[in-house]
Image (cartoon, coloured by chain):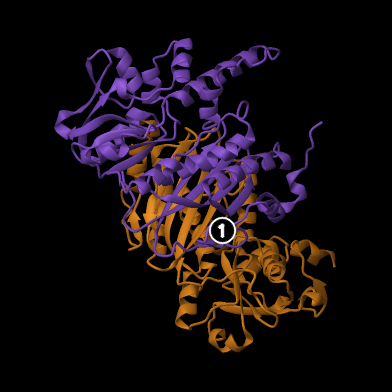
Chain colours: A purple, B orange
Amino acid sequence: MEERTEIASLGEFGLIEHLTKNFEIKQASTIVTVGDDAAVIDHFGKQTVITNDLLVEGVHFDLMYTPLKHLGYKTVVVNVSDIYAMNATPTQILLGLAFSNRFSLEALDEFYAGVHAACEEYGVDLIGGDTSTSQKGFIISCTAIGEVPPEKFVRRDTARKGDLLCVTGDLGAAYLGLTILEREKRIYLENPKIQPDLENEQYIVGRLLKPEARKDIIEFFEEKELTPTAMIDVSDGLSSEILHICTKSNLGCVLYEEKIPIGEDTRQAAFKFNVDPTACALSGGEDYELLFTVKQEDYDKIKDNAQISVVGYLTDVEEGRTIYTKGGTRHPLTAQGWNAFKQQ
Amino acid sequence: MEERTEIASLGEFGLIEHLTKNFEIKQASTIVTVGDDAAVIDHFGKQTVITNDLLVEGVHFDLMYTPLKHLGYKTVVVNVSDIYAMNATPTQILLGLAFSNRFSLEALDEFYAGVHAACEEYGVDLIGGDTSTSQKGFIISCTAIGEVPPEKFVRRDTARKGDLLCVTGDLGAAYLGLTILEREKRIYLENPKIQPDLENEQYIVGRLLKPEARKDIIEFFEEKELTPTAMIDVSDGLSSEILHICTKSNLGCVLYEEKIPIGEDTRQAAFKFNVDPTACALSGGEDYELLFTVKQEDYDKIKDNAQISVVGYLTDVEEGRTIYTKGGTRHPLTAQGWNAFKQQ
């Protein structure tokens, strides 16, 4: 039988101390950490970048198929991804958790093990923790902090006409991972004797449950002395993010379907589920890749990086937002890229 | 009939834009605000102080008797209070909200009106907003950011033997406000025709529903060139906060019951409810006053401030943590000050 320690046996301060005791400080900027009214950071002349996210059980994740350790890891990744999307380096996080009494200390330890692994991977310090009870479900609030040299941050609204639209890695896998996990959940609920069939689906399931943020790309920009003209992370699907940059920068765009990076495992899973792989990339979401724009003269700096695909370019706003399909036909790009695509 | 606009009619980005459109930037340190992957702040050589809090309906507040506008105000106050408790000035906040579909746009507008009023009062900028749905209840995540000149922040663990224990304002009122609202709720649920009887209880109810943070005290410290040796905000009751400072600083203390500041309205309400007013101050919580320690030689700087009461002093850890009652008897101070007090 699994061990179960009631959280009440530690008290609130005992709990925070227990959960954070293995976290070592890695950043010189962390001056005061967990255990005071507030944390203190000093970015020594750099600017501070900050973002927060609320993850709610039953809305953002399903504990039926999400291991708590993965969830802890993903909580950090989702937030540091927003910091990278500003061309900044993540340095600290604060966590607030609310959970019902069905949670044991061992369950929280699992969650924090994932948080710890991600803090190690991305070099961030956990500097604040707040825990409380909830009436229902597990609620996670995460604030990520980062630093950037003065005025080196990259916004969404600063792209220019003619800039190249670039995206990292490959897209659409997380959506298919979610699709297969939801299918297996339905099958299990109908007949708990049937074991989930996830063979050959490690890639797409892994992309959903344990995504990574593109630390390597920010380091690559620094190495190449390249500053994108605009950047955003791909959390809601490629079309939605491209439209954000276009709207905020008051521009149009041309996107080429054939240039959208989609992995072989993703393609095969899409065919199995009888969905269009391009639609998964355009509207699937949760890929946590980076979408950014660069000046045309910077093309040479990115062309040899296999992790970066040029998928189109930006135009005057009057030219609209367009996707050219593989067949050569032209469609307006909409936030519901998938539906728009299918209807035409 | 009250107007009701479905939130879904705006979409997520439309919603954030709608809710934040009246918020003007007040701080020079706010470089990038709502609407990008993350916000950017520049404290220009000062250190950054940061805290976050999760407020969950049914755990931290009851919407049956908490007006949404007050809740929005209190959300900001609770968080800036932690910033003041570091001897820092709050500059920005980020908000994350999750709500079920019983919430209309008008309800969120009410909440944001309160947030806006508090941002004006405390001079802070709202720089990030995240909204999502919840399966049940209203969940609020707030991150507050502040600034402090290098090494001027005040921790909990730096008090010294002989320092004076000081507390601001008066204590115990919020707990009695909660008591009366809970009583009126029970009466109403038993018989909805009975109107709540809150006459003469404005002070205690106001202290619960619309608390203020002690901005004035931090300004007073600056004016007097006084740096407390330790500080914490009083959110869980005076005894719990004193014990925090003692434990973190490895000290004992002597506290005098007769010195604990309790308002006349609070005393009268306590007698009406047949509870000990001192117990309300020691264990009530939610007062959002400041508890701090100063060196004895700084007594002259604080003695004329009517908002500051000296309630005791710090001793060697071996001397224990003691409260002297009005009757002159001596009791150990415990985190459950109330119970300990009653038993003896």
Q: Quadrant where the N terminus of chain B lies?
A: top left
Q: Is residue B210 left or right of residue B106?
A: right
Can you say whether B236 is above or below A264 in the image?
below
> Who's the residue at 63% across and 72% down the image?
B262
Residue A21 vertical position relative to residue B148 in the rendered view, above or below: above
What residue is at 47 percent from the left and 32 percent from the top?
A: B101
Task: Residue type at mark 1: give it.
Answer: Leu
Q: Position of residue A11 (x, y in %)?
A: 73, 52
Does residue B190 appear to the left or right of B14 in the view shown? right
**Residue matched to label 1:** B208
| A264 vs A92, nearest the viewer | A264
Residue nearest the observer in this picture, B283 or B246:
B246
Q: Quarter of the image containing the C terminus of chain B?
A: bottom right
Residue positioned 42% across, 37% down in the render: B104
Which of the pair A36/B292 is nearer the observer?
A36
Residue A160: percent from left, percent from top: 20, 41
Q: Chain of mark 1?
A: B
Q: Quadrant of residue B269?
A: bottom right
